[in-house]
Amino acid sequence: MTNAFDGFPDVIGGSAGIFDHNSASVAGQHGGLSAHDTPQTNPTRFGVAVLMACRGCGRPAQLMIEYPELICVQYNAFPQNVWAALQQLGRHPPVQEPTMWEYSAANAGMFPIKQCGWCRTPLVPIFTPEEAQAHVNKALQSGWIQDPAAAQQLAQLAYQVAKQQPAR
Ligand SMILES: [Zn+2]
């Protein structure tokens, strides 16, 4: 996962901006993000772009959730545990920026550990396994996952890792 689209110059450099087509619903009459915690998700070929308002300072925060992370979340496997398993196999994590994820029992989903760049309040964009699966399926259907066979292998590894995780 990456913060503020670091490493995704195509996304920020675009003339229109990836949020333009759906930003109206959060802009509101005051021109800023609403106070709602609900993040907006926008699937892209780089990953799922998340736009949310920081609960601490209200500034907009942008995150990019990479598809390999969502493949892990789909199986309720912590991405960091899956990357560790991959490294034991001598392979690198298939993400630009490995990020620790936590589990939210209240929301039955996972979220990356990221803070607002301005006030350090944790951003909590939660993905349930079902949401992650829907994003992964869309990415597969859209041809955004370059190597579907590798994604399938990753899914199998995530499934195994999830079974070995300590009970929550
Ligand atoms: Zn903030």
Image (cartoon, rainbow, N blue to C red):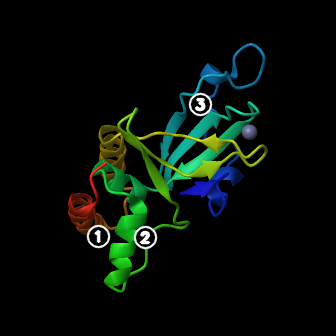
Residue for badge 2: 94
Residue at 35%, 37% in the rendered image:
108
Q: CA distance from mark 1 to mark 2?
A: 10 Å
Which image quadrant is residue 23 in? top right
Name the residue furthest top. Answer: 29
- Relative to 125, 6 lies left or right: right
Residue 45 appears anywhere in the view: no
Q: Which mark is residue 150?
A: 1
Q: CA distance from mark 3 to mark 2?
A: 29 Å
Q: CA distance from mark 3 to mark 1?
A: 32 Å
Q: Position of residue 32 (x, y in %)?
A: 75, 24
Q: Position of residue 46 (x, y in %)?
A: 50, 56
Q: What amino acid is labelled 3 in the image?
A: His
Residue for badge 3: 21
Q: Secondary structure at mark 2?
A: loop
Which of the two marks, 3 or 2, is nearer to us in this view?
A: 2
Q: Position of residue 130 (x, y in %)?
A: 29, 39
The image shows a total of numbered marks equal to 3
Q: Are marks 1 and 2 in contact (CB under 8 Å)?
A: yes
Q: What amino acid is labelled 1 in the image?
A: Ala
Whether the residue under disc 1 has CB within 8 Å of ligand 1:
no
